[in-house]
Every structure is written in structure tokens, then in C-alpha cells.
Image (cartoon, grey):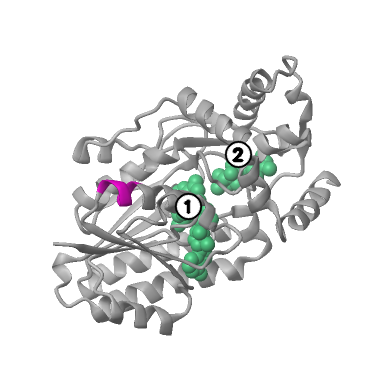
Amino acid sequence: MKKNILITGGAGFIGSHVVRLFINKYPNYNIYNLDKLTYAGNLENIRDIENSSNYNFIKGDITDSKFINELFNKIDFDGVIHLAAESHVDRSIENPDEFINTNILGTLNLLNAAKNTWKEKEDKLFYHISTDEVYGSLGEKGLFTEETSYDPRSPYSASKASSDHLVRAYMHTYGLNTVISNCSNNYGANQFPEKLIPLVINNIKKNKAIPVYGKGENVRDWLFVKDHATAIDTVFHKGKAGETYNIGGNNEWQNIDLIKKICEISDSRLNRKKGESEKLITFVKDRAGHDLRYAIDSSKIATELNWKPSLTFEEGIEITISWYLENQAWLDNVLSGEYENYYKQQYSERENK
Ligand code: NAD
Ligand code: TYD
């Protein structure tokens, strides 16, 4: 029987990879991609699958409760995979309100619509995609597990933590089947170039300063986005309702080392002299409340659901750098509009630290 699956945020970075995977792997699913197309959402990200017979695009805003209720009344969704969010920490520091609206109230609207329209609740699943940033910041040692207490420290992570709590509350209170995964930093094609890895590659291409916050000593665990998509597929189909799964790449990098690695690979790809791109590195004012280190223990999803990343970081970063070097039209497209002004203002303030 055909299943109706709602994927929110499917025109964004991770969502577009999830939509593509589901469209190609599950011809018996009707995929509904609901996206507002903010600056971070772009239909170019999913151009290749837009004519698939099992694909439907709905332009809409999850903060609009009337619209969300009407949608759930019109279509009997069998599952929701909820990715739509405001996702950039720096923007959350500048403008927290948008994060509260989309990430908390938007999630609440989806939960209410599911609670009110899903009759056979046990056959349906509400899957909420979240971040490891809800756990706060680690010192030099230790890993986040599913038992780590929540300690969000940026407006972004606080809004995601709040939505996670709402999702769990709707399971306990109203019997909605829910599952949550918390993932580390993703990288790969189609990521808006305000996030570290695409920003660094784009600036190298343009011979622009590479802004390193503080001393570049902060640590992130990086996972290739297609591996996150396969983890989401795994949790959606094999995860146990009520459970949380941490997803990570077991791949920690200090920002400065990661940036130097990208410079080195880019020099060789662009036929530049060794060390040329590194000269662009510029230390700028640190991010307010900058979390020192994120690192994930993903042994639960590995042992219980048999998921692991398919690529090494060396493979993933090579693919990623090639993609941004070869897709200038995509970069020009997403960077047109309001973004250039935002970037200039952000970085002139940082450089005048
Ligand atoms: P993104 O910013 O690239 O994409 C977000 C998408 O949501 C965009 O297409 C945007 O148009 C859409 N959207 C935003 N507000 C909306 C609204 N009000 N209504 C409907 N659609 C709206 O984000 P991403 O990096 O792909 O992240 C996707 C999800 O994964 C988020 O929930 C994020 O918290 C989570 N996550 C991201 C990472 C990461 O490294 N990027 C890591 C872990 C978890
Ligand atoms: P980012 O990609 O914004 O992801 P997050 O803050 O969600 O982890 O940033 C990754 C790391 O890189 C983080 O420690 C902040 C740092 N960073 C820079 O040093 N310079 C930059 O221009 C950006 C965007 C981030």
C-alpha cells in the first residue's frame, strides 16, 4: 500500500538529501516536501528529482497553524520527518525570535496537527530531527550519549532543545509515536555557504579572508550529509518509538586544523602553490558564548540499528570540495539577494574586533 510521508525542510541542506534518498529508494511512498523556501531553502537542491511521480512539493510555513491543520486534514500522513528549522547559530545570536517561532512554535503546530488528525496513532510516526548542540559543550574529554543532560547554550540550541522536549511530551501525554535523533555537524553538497566548510571553500575560491573565530581551537565532530540521510532512513524504519538516537561521524576536528586541511586540498585542486590558501586565514572576534567542543557517542544506533557512516572523512571532504569548486552556478544562485549584505556587515564587525 502507498504511504504518505511528510518531510519538512526538504529544500534545505540535509532535507534535500533525505528527500532524494526516499524518492529513489521507496517508490511506494508518496513524498510530500513542505518548505517555506527561506534564504536557506532552494529548489535547485532537488531539481533532479522534482519530476518523480512519487514527489510533491508544498510551499508553506510551519508557523502557520491554520495552514498546517488544513494540510493534515487534507492528506492522511503515515509519517512525518521534521527537519524544517532555522539552523545557523550566528543568526540565532543576532535574531533569536525567528528561531523561537520556527523551531519551537512550528514544531508545536506539527505536533498538534498530528495529535488531532491521526486516528490510528500506533501506525504513524513523528520523527524529529535534532542536533547534538542541545547537550551543551564538552571539555577536552568525554562524549555526548543519549543520557547526557540537556544544557543548551545558544538561542539556536535552546530552541532545538525546547522542540525536543515538546516532542517527548506529546508522546507521554497524548500517545503520539515519536522518535528523535541528535546529530553532529554535517558537511557536503548544497549547504548554505554561511556554515564553516562551504564558507571556507567559497572564500578560498574568491581569494577572500577566511574568518576563524577566536583561536580556532573549538572542536566539532563532522559527518558526511549522505551518511546522515542513511541514518535518518534507518531510524525512521527501524527506530523504536519513544527512543532517542545520537548520530555522529566519530571524526573530531579542531576548526583551525580542519581549515588548514581544506586549504591544502584546495591548493592542489586549484593548481595553486602549496600554502597559498592558508595565507587567507584571518583570526576574528570570537562568537558570543562559543561552545568549545561537541563529540558524539553513536554506539547505540550502531549496535541497536546497525548503522555506521559509509565514508571516511578524507573521502567525504574530497567529494565536498570538488562539489563546491564545480558548482559555481549554485553558489551564485544561493548567494544572490540579501546574503551578501548580511555577510559584509557580519564580518566587518568581526574584523574590527
Ligand atoms: P537548513 O537551514 O539548510 O534548511 C532548513 C530548511 O527549512 C530550509 O529549506 C528552509 O527553507 C526550511 N524552513 C525554515 N523555516 C521554515 C518554516 N517556517 N516553514 C517551513 N520550512 C522552513 O538546515 P539543515 O542544516 O539542513 O538542518 C536541517 C535540520 O537538521 C534542522 O532541524 C537542524 O536543526 C538539524 N541539524 C542540522 C545539522 C547541521 O549540521 N546542519 C546537524 C544536526 C541537526
Ligand atoms: P558552524 O558551521 O556555524 O556550525 P556550528 O556553530 O553549528 O557548530 O561553525 C562550525 C565551527 O566553526 C564553530 O566552532 C564556529 C566556527 N566558525 C568559524 O571559525 N568561522 C566562521 O566563519 C564560521 C561560520 C564558523
Q: Which of 278 and 170 is in front in this view?
A: 278
Which range of residues does the magenta coloring cover?
21-25
- What's the magenta bit mostly, secondary-structure-wise? helix
SS of the residue under disc 1: helix
x then y, percent, for residue 70: 35, 83
Q: Which of marks 2 and 1 is nearer the N terminus?
A: 1
Outermost residue toward the right in this view: 352
Q: Which amino acid does label 1 sit on?
A: Arg
Q: Which amino acid does label 2 sit on?
A: Asn
Is 274 on the left or on the right of 59, as rendered?
Answer: right
Is 170 on the left or on the right of 222, as rendered?
Answer: left
Residue 284, relative to residue 60: is it above or below? above
x then y, percent, for residue 125: 23, 63
Residue 291, visible in the rendered structure = no
Disc sitting over residue 47 in the figure: 1
Residue 24 part of the magenta segment: yes
Residue depicted at x 44% and y 51%? 16
Q: How far apart are marks 2 and 1 (CA)?
A: 14 Å
Disc sitting over residue 327 in the figure: 2
x then y, percent, for residue 283: 76, 35
Residue depicted at x 58% and y 54%? 88
Residue 197, relative to residue 146: is it above or below? above
Residue 320 part of the magenta segment: no
Q: Nearer the viewer, residue 40 or 250?
A: 40
Residue depicted at x 48% and y 52%? 47
